[in-house]
Image (tube, coloured by chain):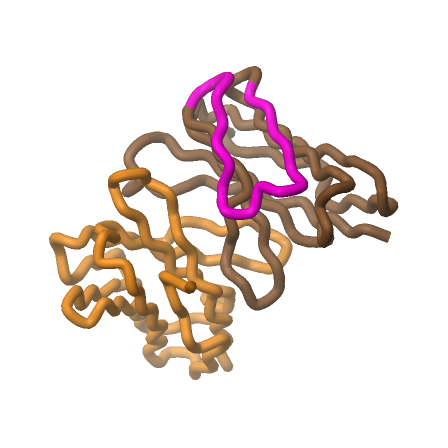
Chain colours: A brown, B orange
Amino acid sequence: DGGITQSPKYLFRKEGQNVTLSCEQNLNHDAMYWYRQDPGQGLRLIYYSQIVNDFQKGDIAEGYSVSREKKESFPLTVTSAQKNPTAFYLCASRAGPVDYGYTFGSGTRLTVV
Amino acid sequence: DQQVKQNSPSLSVQEGRISILNCDYTNSMFDYFLWYKKYPAEGPTFLISISSIKDKNEDGRFTVFLNKSAKHLSLHIVPSQPGDSAVYFCAASARSNYQLIWGAGTKLIIKP
C-alpha cells in the first residue's frame, strides 16, 4: 500500500541534543512538507520541498533543518536551538494540484526531557 | 494574524442529527478550501474540498458550503455518526503557491 511512514511514533530527547525525525513516502509525490501541531493550534509549516535537492523555510523554521536528497525521503532535524521542541510533528506530501489534498503520515510525538 | 479561524474549539451533537462546523477566513486571495479530519495521535485525512468558483460541494454525508462575500465556509455532516467524533480542520490555499493555511480545529463529539 502506498503511503507516508513517519518514525519513530514517540521520541524522547534530552535538552541540548539534536534529533532527526524520519519521513518516507512511496506515493511518487513531488512535494513534501513538515508541520508542527501544538494543543489548541492549527498546523504550522516548518519546511517544505517541491523537488529533490530543493527546500524552503515555512513559518516556523528556526531551530529546524531538513534535507531532500531523494524524492522518497524528507528527514527533519530538531536542533538544540529550537526553544520549545516538545510537539506533535506531521509529515505530508502532495501529488499535484492542491485540490487532491495532502497525504499525511501518522506523526511523531517528540518530548524533551 | 490568523487568516483562517475556527471559532468553536468543540461541538457536541446527538447521533443522527446534523453537525455544522464553521470556518472564517480573512484573505480574499484564497481560492481553494479543504476540510480534514483528525483522530488523536494520527495524521489528518482529507475529507472534502471546494473551489471558490462553487458555493456547494457534496460527498455522501458531507457537504461544504462557501459564502465568499462573508468569507465563511461550513461543513455539514448528516446524519452524524459515532465515528465522526474527531477534530476537524479547515484549511485554505491560494493557487499562487499551494501552501495550506490551517485553522485551529474544532473537536466534534457525537453523543449516543
Say if residue B107 shows up in the picture: yes
Residue B1 in percent (x, y) is at 42, 63
Residue B81 lies in the magenta stretch: no
- Would you place residue A11 above or below residue B53 in this image? above
Residue in view at x 58 percent, y 55 percent: A37
Residue in view at x 68 percent, y 53 percent: A87
Residue in view at x 48 percent, y 18 percent: A52
Looking at the rendering, which quadrant does residue A105 occupy?
A: top right
Of residue A67 and residue B91, the one placed in the foreground of this image is A67
Residue A39 in percent (x, y) is at 61, 64
B103 vs A26, left or right, is left
Residue in view at x 55 percent, y 42 percent: A46
Residue A53 lies in the magenta stretch: yes
- Would you place residue A39 above or below residue B32 in this image? below
A87 vs A33, left or right, is right
Looking at the rendering, which quadrant does residue B63 occupy?
A: bottom left
Numbered circles on residues, count: 0
Q: Which residues are magenta?
A: A51-68
Say if residue B112 shows up in the picture: no
Residue B87 in percent (x, y) is at 50, 65
Of residue B112 and residue B85, the one placed in the foreground of this image is B85
